[in-house]
Image (cartoon, grey):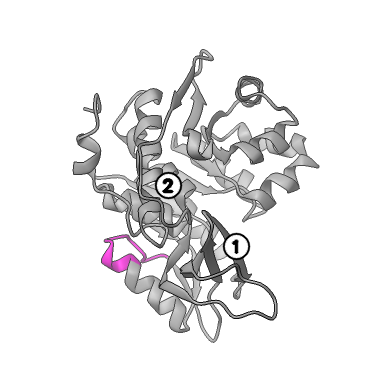
Amino acid sequence: MNKKILVYGPVFADLIYSKLDGKPKVGKEVFAKNFLVTSGGLSITAVGLARLGFPTKLIAEVGNDHFGKHILKKLHSEKIDVSDIEILENAQTNISTAFVYNNDRGFITRMGSRTDLEKLHIKIISKFKKGDVSHFHTLLDFDKNIYNLLQEAKKYKIRTSLVTGWDGAKKYTENRENLVNIFKYTDYFFCNLLEAKILTALDSNKDILYKFRDWGVRPVITLGAEGAVTISDNKIIYSAVPPDVNFVDPTGAGDSFAAAFIAGLEKNYKFEKCLKIGVFCGSKSTEKIGGSTAFPKWEEIEELDNVK
């Protein structure tokens, strides 16, 4: 039986504008040369994993509106198992409107309707019990019961990972004790350097990496244009630098990075190699508008030096 990677968390309809003729301001109209509607949120990680050839299941919620149908169509086309996505009747899907300007981006987000997450918990734990999940990946600040889900996953010897955003990082600076408890059942934690600094209240990369390991989790920290760093169980620090890319849109680069890193784990690669392919895929994903549009296939990864 081929086990699946289970991704659980919010998905969005991403409406992305790029190549603007000016900086957006209140009271001023600007025009974009490029526009795309695609799936965002943790669906970007699911798409990346599926594109690399790994059986992937996504558990999330969408409305039965136009945007929800668009997301499901996109995920079907990527061969992702969406059979357990909760489709909410007479409900709205999460929408995020993004604009890319001067190598940065801004967002306007409208959160859609929410289901009773207990319904999704039942589905997730059922998959754990059946023994058909190899890795469980989710968002830190999405589900207040994430501790219980991670604990349940580890009961069945499932590898686990968390990713955070800025809101999650800010929330847990006020509650680090809860964060450390969550990390007891988390194997890998993905974040960017700014989020890592606010969570640890430290400045140097080395100190930050050591602090996370002391908390019992393996941190994987993206550094923007400088690549990424991680640390092994015996506290050896690894780093990887990004390739040269034709930058277009940074949307979802961190989620693409996480997908490729998890793919490396699935192939039993060493941390250094996982980091290298994560940086490669995260960087390549910025070459086209949309978080997953330019995500590479495994054949491109195999062309990297020393990746076997």
Residue type pointed to by label 2: Lys
Residue 20 vs 257, above or below: the answer is: below
Give x and y (percent) for residue 230: 50, 26
- The residue at 56%/47% (across/down) is 149
Residue 174 as seen in the image, left or right of residue 19? right
Disc 2 or disc 1, which is closer to the eye?
1
Say which quadrant the N terminus sits in: top left
Packing grade of label 2 (10 A; few <14, some 14-19, many >=20) is few
- Side (left or right) of 84 relative to 20: left
Three-letter code for the amino acid on which mark 1 is drawn = Gly
Q: Which residues are magenta?
A: 75-84
Occupied quadrant, residue 280: top left
Residue 106, numbered label: 1
Please tell me whether residue 180 belongs to the stretch shown in magenta.
no
Residue at 47% in and 59% down: 123
Give the vertical position of 143 relative to 31 (above or below): above
- The residue under the point 44% across, 52% down is 7
Which quadrant: the C terminus? top left
Q: Earlier in the sequence, mark 2 or mark 1?
A: 1
- Quarter occupied by residue 85: bottom left
Judging from the image, what secondary structure is the residue with disc 2 in? helix
Name the spot of residue 221 as percent of width and height, x first.
Answer: 54, 34
The answer to whether the residues at label 2 and label 1 have Cβ atoms under 8 Å apart is no
Q: Is residue 171 visible?
A: yes
Check disc 2 and report the residue beneath it. 129
Question: Of 106 and 1, which appears nearest the observer?
Answer: 106
User: How far apart are the two marked residues, 2 and 1, measured between alpha carbons?
Assistant: 41 Å
**What kind of secondary structure does the magenta stretch mostly adopt?**
loop
- Mark seen at residue 150: none
Check residue 82 for magenta coloring: yes
